[in-house]
Image (spheres, grey):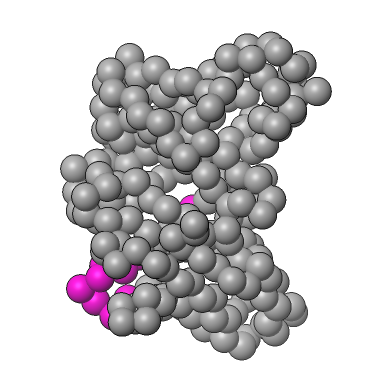
Amino acid sequence: DQQVKQNSPSLSVQEGRISILNCDYTNSMFDYFLWYKKYPAEGPTFLISISSIKDKNEDGRFTVFLNKSAKHLSLHIVPSQPGDSAVYFCAASSGGSQGNLIFGKGTKLSVKP
Amino acid sequence: DAEITQSPRHKITETGRQVTLACHQTWNHNNMFWYRQDLGHGLRLIHYSYGVQDTNKGEVSDGYSVSRSNTEDLPLTLESAASSQTSVYFCASSEGGVAADTQYFGPGTRLTVL
């Protein structure tokens, strides 16, 4: 059973608008969440993370929101740029896992000029 | 700059052959991981290591093995390659020993088993 779910396989937005990528999880022991971006023919690159003691973390155009009661997190990209077009993976870990991550299946974001 | 590299980047092999994919990191990270990425499955963990001489099975370990003889390297071996092992393989490393641990990925190896 999937512990980390990204229910939207793809998302298309217009350049300059907001992109919102969603992720749901089932394991209440998860306490650290990450987003990775992946371009074709490259490895995933770390984008942003959030600890369960926070509900928001911001880094430039990227903001991650965490709703623990709903077991839901989202990544907001504002404003979206064509270079943001990539596959975005949500990942989660628990303190007892010694750093092992559980990944979602990814959402392919397309930003149209 | 510290980095993580994988070789080869592309490999074509035949069913039944033994194949070894290399992973090398210069961050002096304790933890190293191998994943495979397949359409519709995302990233699935094959094997991982928390340090020298330590190896552990992940979600999809059947048909794969790893060994960790030093901090920098974690080679992944396919004992007898099968067509189902055609995939893109990613190696990752992380510092380990910290609560909020971030993994850093290599560029990937595309393996085709004919």
Question: In terms of depth relative to the viewer, which is nearer, A16 or B105?
Answer: B105
Magenta extent: A45-57
Give the residue displayed 69% in from the left and 11% down from the top. Answer: B17
Give the residue displayed 74% in from the left and 27% down from the top. Answer: B83
Seen in the picture, residue A99 relative to B112 is either above or below; the reply is below
Left or right of B1 on screen, residue A109: right
Quadrant for residue A20, please give it. Answer: bottom right
Name of the residue lying farthest toward the front: A1
In this orientation, does residue A47 appear? Answer: no
Q: Position of residue B75 (x, y in %)?
A: 47, 21
Which corner quadrant holds the C terminus of chain A?
bottom right
Question: In terms of depth relative to the viewer, which is nearer, B100 or A15?
Answer: B100
Quadrant for residue B36, please give it. Answer: top right
Seen in the picture, residue B46 relative to A98 is either above or below; the reply is above
Quadrant for residue A67, please give it. Answer: bottom left
Is A65 contained in the magenta span?
A: no
Give the residue displayed 62% in from the left and 32% down from the top. Answer: B109
Q: Would you say the magenta stretch is mainly helix, strand or loop?
A: strand
Q: Position of residue B42 (x, y in %)?
A: 58, 52
